[in-house]
Amino acid sequence: MPSSEPVSLVKLRKGDHGVLLTLPEQAELRSQCIRLGICVGAQVRCSQRLPGGTIIIEIGRQEIAIGKALAAAIEVNMG
C-alpha cells in the first residue's frame, strides 16, 4: 500500500517495500546500521515478521533481523 507519509519500519508488513529515510539519532546505533548496509536511500522489503516484534528485512541480497525498538527508530517511505 503506497504512502507519501513516512512510516516507522516496524509498521511494514510481510511483502511491503520501501526506501529508508532516517536512521536512529544515537551515534552507536547509526554506525551499527551503516555497517550492516542499513543506510538512508536503501531499498528494503519486509520478508518476515517474528513474534515479539522482530522484523526481517531484505536489502539487496542480504536479510537482516531488526528488533522492535530499533525498527521503531527507522523511518521508511513505502511504495
Image (cartoon, rainbow, N blue to C red):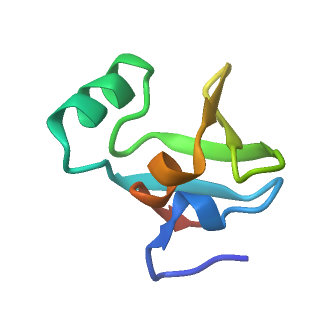
Please name the residue shown 41% across and 54% down the image. Answer: 74
Which quadrant would residue 45 be assigned to in this image?
Answer: top right
Position of residue 1 in the picture relative to residue 37 (left or right): right
Above or below for 11 versus 61:
below
Which quadrant would residue 2 be assigned to in this image?
Answer: bottom right
**Image position, residue 37 (x, y; %):** 43, 23
Please name the residue shown 37% across and 30% down the image. Answer: 33
**Image position, residue 21 (x, y; %):** 35, 57
Please name the residue shown 74% across and 59% down the image. Answer: 16
* Farthest residue, direction front: 52
Position of residue 78 in the picture relative to residue 49 (left or right): left
**Image position, residue 72 (x, y; %):** 48, 60
* Farthest residue, direction left: 27
Viewer-nearest residue: 53 or 7 = 53
Report the quarter where the C terminus lies: bottom right
Please name the residue shown 83% across and 54% down the image. Answer: 14
Q: How many marks?
A: 0
**Image position, residue 62 (x, y; %):** 64, 20
